[in-house]
């Protein structure tokens, strides 16, 4: 299963990044929660690779005591469908990773 997620700017509610992961956890009520491993990776990259637009955005939020809002957009079982959905979303939003999606 692929989880398609968005990172949202808490100041504007704008979707700034769309990605996918296969790593999730469920809370005590069984609800799907943020993929902790993927978020950890984004924060680690922000600390180490300051020149990347996503890192700059995350660091600007952290400097203000904020962090991206993580939202699951969809789940799909097929890798091809995952790529199609991400491409579709990239054409609809001004994403920091728009140039990386091909």
Image (cartoon, rainbow, N blue to C red):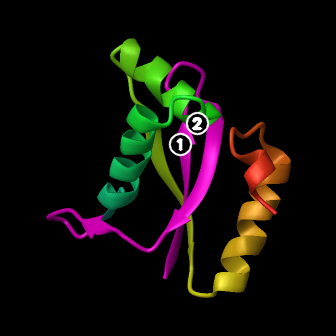
Is residue 92 shown above or below 51?
A: below
Relative image position of residue 102 (x, y in whole percent) = 82, 63
Q: CA distance from mark 1 to mark 2?
A: 10 Å
Find numbered disc 2 in the image and state the secondary structure of the residue it sits on: helix
In the image, 74: left or right of 95? left
Q: Are marks 1 and 2 in contact (CB under 8 Å)?
A: yes
Q: Residue furthest top?
A: 64
Residue at the limit of the structure toward the left, as seen here: 28
Query: Would you say 20 lies left or right of 41 here?
Result: right
- Precedes in sequence: disc 1 or disc 2: 1
Residue to which mark 2 is pinned: 54
Residue at label 1? 7
Q: Quadrant of residue 37?
A: bottom left
Secondary structure state at the residue bearing disc 1: strand
Which residue sits furthest right? 91
Q: Residues within 10 Å of mark 1 (few under 14, many from 20)?
A: many
The residue at 33%/16% (across/down) is 65
Residue depicted at x 27% and y 67%: 25
Residue occupying the point 38% across, 22% down: 62
Residue 18 is left or right of residue 28, and the answer is right
Q: Residue farthest to the bottom?
A: 78
Above or below, comparing residue 10 to residue 90 in the picture: above
Q: Position of residue 101 (x, y in %)?
A: 76, 58
Q: Which class describes the residues within 10 Å of circle 2: few (<14), some (14-19), or many (20+)?
A: many
Quadrant position of residue 94: top right
Q: Magenta region: which residues?
A: 1-30
**Residue 55 drawn in magenta:** no
Position of residue 49 measured from the top left corner of the image (x, y, whole percent): 50, 36
């Amino acid at each position: 299963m692929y989880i398609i997620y968005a990172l949202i700017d808490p100041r504007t509610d704008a979707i700034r990044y769309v990605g996918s992961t296969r790593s999730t956890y469920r809370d005590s009520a069984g609800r799907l929660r943020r993929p902790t491993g993927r978020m950890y990776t984004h924060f680690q990259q922000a600390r180490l690779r300051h020149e990347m637009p996503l890192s700059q955005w995350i660091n600007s939020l952290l400097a203000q005591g904020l962090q991206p809002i993580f939202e699951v957009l969809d789940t799909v079982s097929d890798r091809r469908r995952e790529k199609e959905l991400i491409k579709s979303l990239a054409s609809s939003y001004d994403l920091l990773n728009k140039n990386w999606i091909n």
